[in-house]
Amino acid sequence: MRIHLLIPEVRELLQEGRRDDLLSVLQEMHPTDAASILNALTVEEIAQILAILPTDQERDVFGYLEPEVQELYVAGAGRDRVMNVLQSMLSDDRAEFLDRLDPRVRDQLIPMLPNAAREDLLRRSTFRDDQVGAFLSTDYAVLNPLLTARGAISELRRQAPSKETIYYSYVVDRFGKLLGFVSLRDLIMAPEATPVGEIMKTDLVSVPAEADQEEAARLIRDYDLLALPVVDSSGRLVGIVTHDDAVDIVEEEAQEDFEKMAGVTGNRESDDFLAEPVLRQFRRRAPVICLLALFWLMTASVIQGFEELLHGNVLLVATMPMVMAIGGMVGSQASTLIIRALSTQSRTPFRRMITKELLVSVTLALVLGGVAFGNALMLQGWNGSGGELAATARIAVVIAIAMAADVVFAAALGASIPNLVRLLRIDPALISTPAVTAMTDLTGAAIFLALVTVML
């Protein structure tokens, strides 16, 4: 709230030409707060403010602007200003920004970039979007192993303005092969004359450029890294993945898994539900829903086969949806929990997972069976059919047993399918909640009707 109150003040300082005061105000802010103010200004005002900021702050503030504001700036700020901003941006931020632009605008900007930047963009285009090589940063600090600790600190002071991080520096030979890494703390604590080669750590954790982005995020999490080096097939250092990249990866993968579990297919092209066109939403959601309709058709066919049994028996007709719904919910819960366990505890044996879920489901079955028994008695009483108490209790017992059996089976199904799918090297999240619900509806109806037929 306080940031928005500063918008009139910033605009007034700009209009009065008090650039030193304006610079002082903005330099005291975090770049994201400064960007929040600039988002409310015109393109001309944004260009004037960015022009007075130091290069590194200009780069950071521009990176936090809303994507729509960035695109307006590119369209209206003039070629020279745009090129200054692009050249000052970090490599991964520049690639992400250009990727968001209209292809025609992007094709006009790329030829104006330096050769190194164009080559970086070309190399990134050879990787899939979910591979490390597509989003790594090439703005990392490197040191020669023969430098002394004092010389290394001086070298880092020279490199720092253009690097994403200097807390980790990577030691490479003259061919670019990664030898080790050294932290800024280790350099400061070491005697000044000690060679970097003696300070560096060689127990490296790295990732190939072809690796999946989830693997990079997992390594950063497991080893508590600030940055993860990326190497090619020859062991040469080609980039780094930073901890903030890992956060973005986890958020993106979580969103993707959420959509899969919700039965939404296709590549996510828009994070804004309201902004995404209706037809695109339809194309993403219709295939799964239509497929699941086949399961519900099968369920209806199973119920139709027991038409004579259900005819005139209001109690059975009234309680069957309850049994099916509870089974579907238990199956969905089991599937969701197992998918979560597979994502965070990949080495957990299948036997332990299924045993744990079955123990929980048996306990649930006892409770829900009792609930089903009580519901059946109450429904029969409210129906006022006047049937014998013993006959009513017998039907209630059968319904309770059917409920318990359906709950256990649904839990076993929900727990087993993600594990079986993983064995086929398919993302378990593809076994979405609607799919598990539809399958457990079918099996629930079959179990209910089969037990009623045998026991009544």
Image (cartoon, grey):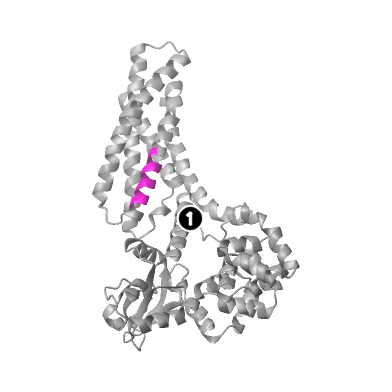
Taking the spot 38% from the left edge, 41% from the top edge, the residue there is 331
User: Is 346 in front, or is 452?
Assistant: 346
| Number of marks | 1
The image shows residue 96 at horizontal and vertical percentages of 54, 70
Q: Residue furthest right?
A: 16
Q: Residue furthest bottom?
A: 174
Q: Is residue 245 visible?
A: yes
The image shows residue 113 at horizontal and vertical percentages of 58, 83
- Does residue 194 sit above or below 401 in this rendering? below
Taking the spot 31% from the left edge, 42% from the top edge, the residue there is 412
Left or right position of 26 against 311 = right
- Does residue 456 sit above or below 41 in this rendering? above
| Kind of element beneath mark 1 | helix
Prevailing secondary structure of the magenta residues: helix
* Magenta residues (range): 330-341
Q: Which residue is mark 1?
A: 255
Q: Based on the displayed image, in which of its 4 quarters is residue 355 positioned? A: top left
The image shows residue 456 at horizontal and vertical percentages of 33, 23
Taking the spot 32% from the left edge, 22% from the top edge, the residue there is 397
Q: Amino acid at mark 1?
A: Gln
User: Is 102 in front, or is 399?
Assistant: 102
Taking the spot 45% from the left edge, 64% from the top edge, the residue there is 244
Q: Is residue 183 magenta?
A: no
- Does residue 267 sit above or below 336 in this rendering? below
Q: Residues within 10 Å of mark 1 (few under 14, many from 20)?
A: some
Q: Is residue 313 visible?
A: no
User: Is 110 in front, or is 259?
Assistant: 110
The image shows residue 71 at horizontal and vertical percentages of 65, 69
Left or right position of 12 against 233 = right
